[in-house]
Image (tube, grey):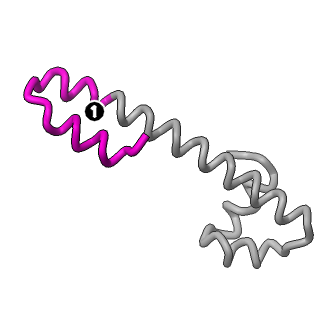
Amino acid sequence: MDLRAELHRVERLTDANERLRRLIALLGEIDKAQSDVMTARDCAIRDLRASGIRVVDLVHLTGLTRARVNQILADTR
């Protein structure tokens, strides 16, 4: 789904109750998509570490803190 296009469609709804209901549903979809992307990112980080990439290089690649990279590698949230 094109989230921006859906947002524009929802914003044009004249019924405020329906608009709110749809916006809340859209936020739920965004949260789920973000969670899925973060899970895939974490898997890629673990794969890169397993292939020999140093933690410091993962920090530079991801822009995450060293502590966060280590949490991901330890599979903790």
Q: Which of 77 and 41 is in front in this view?
A: 41
* Relative horizontal placement of residue 53, taking residue 14 as reference (left or right): right
Q: Of all residues shown, which one is farthest toward the left? A: 14
Rendering coords of residue 69 (x, y %) = 72, 62
Q: Does the magenta stretch include residue 14?
A: yes
Q: Residue at left 80%, top 56%?
A: 73
Q: Which residue carries the number 1 mark?
A: 23
Q: Image height check: is 59 above or below 68?
A: below
Q: Regarding mark 1 in the picture, which secondary structure is present there? A: helix
Rendering coords of residue 38 (x, y %) = 61, 50
Give the quadrant of residue 36: top right
Few, some or many residues within 10 Å of mark 1 (<14, 14–19, 20+): some
Rendering coords of residue 26 (x, y %) = 35, 34
Q: Residue at left 73%, top 46%?
A: 76
The quarter of the picture where the N terminus appears is top left
Q: Image height check: is 69 above or below 36?
A: below
Q: Nearer the viewer, residue 56 or 9?
A: 9
Residue kind at label 1, given as amino acid type = Leu
* Relative horizontal placement of residue 7, taking residue 26 as reference (left or right): left
Q: Nearer the viewer, residue 47 or 15?
A: 15
- Total labels: the figure holds 1
What residue range appears in magenta?
A: 1-24
Give the quadrant of residue 35: top right
Q: Image height check: is 63 above or below 14?
A: below
Q: Residue at left 8%, top 28%?
A: 14
| Majority SS type along the magenta span | helix
